[in-house]
Amino acid sequence: MPTSELSDALNPNVVRPRNYDDVLVYQDRQAHSNFHHLNLPYAQPPQQPQYEYVPHRSELELAVVEPALSQSQPPAPVDHTWEVIRILANLREFEQAEQTRRSTWEREQRDIQARIQGEYERRFRTMQEEIDNLKERIRRFESATAAVPATSQNTVSEPPRELTPFQDLSQEHLSLSNQDSSFPLFVQGSSMESTSYQGNGVSDSISTTDGVQTPCSRKRTTSPSSDEDESSECDEFPSASRPTKRINGHDTRCLTVQHAMRLHLNRLMSTGEDDPLPANHIEGAPLADNEPVRFVWGRTIRQSQHNARMKIRVIGDLMENKGLYKHVPNDDFTMDNLDIVFDQTFSTLRSRYKAQNDANVAQKRKKKDINKMIKIRRANRKRAKLEFRTACRAKNETYSQPTFDGAFQLECMSSEESEDGTASGDQPQTRLTGRAPKSSVIHVRGLGWRSSRLVQLFHILDEVGQNDPALSSTLPRGDKGKHKMTGAAKDTNRAGAFVFPPKGVSSWMISRGWLGRANLVHRDLGNLLTGLIVDHPEFDFRLVTALLGHDNETEESRYHMQQYNTSSSLQYALARP
């Protein structure tokens, strides 16, 4: 097999031949030695031709190709004019692209605004059509009511299916920007007795004309719980249009979906509202569909498959029997809403079951309920004070100026605490009833930050109300017969935090003595009061001083003693400090 010089060079077993000159010299030497061995006369070897030495070029050398060196040419001269023209052209193209992008974005924004405006207009037209339909129904009912023949003034006609509980809605109140103002009947503080139908049958908004009797008589005075059927027959409009407000403490109607869920759970568990909860159900134990509902009280809905099945059973049964709760809005009976309401009710029942079987938990629950009742009772007293003093202010034009607006806040009223309204509940119990006797003393605790000017303002307004029979008759009678005593001022709340004035008070309402005491506790008192004190632009400090005097803690303390140490008559029903 022929081989190449490259393969021979890489093969270590190949013996390299000697040089051609060396071979010739070797052959000459061999011939010379042979002649001497044969003792032949010496003869001159023939002259070999002389070869010119040519260097050998191996295949390895030819395999490596040397790169040809390119001859460097001098750079071409740069024309700066064309370079400037090129840059300007690029800038022009960039500006055109940016302008196109911005015009596209603006066009998209205009399209979005047009769609939103179209949606607003569509809603406006829909709302207007609904209002027109409602007005037409009211007009038809009024004409039908006027055509009913009257048999007697004392007879009560059969209630029709349609009823007019609303007044006409003015079109000028409709606005796209503020939908709340579209219905002026639902303004906070407005009375709905003359514009809405009471489903309890006590009062009605339809007036009685000559020879025409109202569908639901105003003179009927049946109890709320006994005429639930009549209220539903007299009412065509949904329950959302009626005020879900109880008439009095004896009104036991079910008005909310939460109350309906509690009642339905008691119905399915075959227990009463005041009965103890049934025993704990064992997880995995069978429960037939005709048996009462039972829960695993120690686990949540997610932790127990049995509780999850009972949840589905309760919600499904409530959806089927929602007609039992006719005063609850029909829109509240949705799966999502009932799912949330059931979880809340079940959590309450679990805590109730723990309190039922654990004395410590029951004691904590009782204390929590007592604190809640105390908080509600004190808040109601403050609210009654505020309403009474606001009515007295309306009777006195001197204190109707905006300077005194900041004083009529719920947080500015003093706190009235009875001795039996403590959170601890460690009151002595009587031998017969086993309950703590009710105290006949109420401690009136003022707020430490209130100045003597503010206390004097409330004292003047209370005197105005006591001298007015129309206002004095509105005083709360819950504390009648109780003696009111002055208690210590409240510089801190029950949690121990420092009590600051509410936002919106004026500078004349804050006591100088309290500022000194508060500055010892809070070094940054100035920064804290900056966002709380708001003086009206028409604030006149000289008028406040002329009407209410100077701020003097000594005078304030003396005023407190004069106010509560005489008697407990009607003039002290709303004690201030």
Image (cartoon, grey):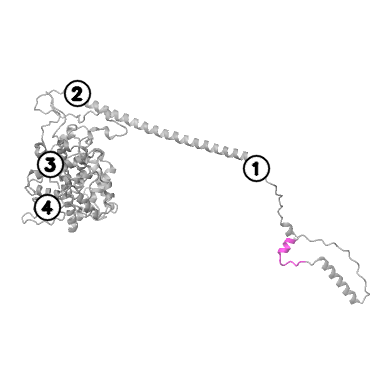
Query: x%, y% of residue 310?
Result: 25, 49
- First in sequence: mark 2 or mark 1? 1
Does 476 appear above or below 488? above
Closest to the camera, between mark 1 and mark 4, is 1
Three-letter residue code for mark 1: Val
Three-letter residue code for mark 2: Ser
User: Dot 4: few (<14), some (14–19), or many (≥20) neighbours within 10 Å?
Assistant: some
Secondary element under disc 2, as helix, strand or loop, is: helix
Find disc 4 in the rendering and name its residue.
420
Secondary element under disc 4, as helix, strand or loop, is: helix
- First in sequence: mark 2 or mark 3? 2
The image quarter in which residue 520 lies? bottom left
Report, in whole angstroms, how far the alpha carbon at label 2 lies from the one at label 1: 98 Å
**Residue 439 placement, left or right of 52:** left
Find disc 2 in the rendering and name its residue.
143
- First in sequence: mark 4 or mark 2? 2
Secondary element under disc 1, as helix, strand or loop, is: loop
The answer to whether mark 4 and mark 2 are in CB contact below 8 A is no
Closest to the camera, between mark 4 and mark 2, is 4
**Span shown in magenta:** 5-16
Closest to the camera, between mark 2 and mark 1, is 1
The answer to whether residue 30 is visible is yes
Query: x%, y% of residue 516?
Result: 22, 52
- First in sequence: mark 3 or mark 4? 4
The answer to whether residue 444 is visible is no
User: Which residue is depicted at the point 19% across and 25% down?
Assistant: 142
Find disc 3 in the rendering and name its residue.
462
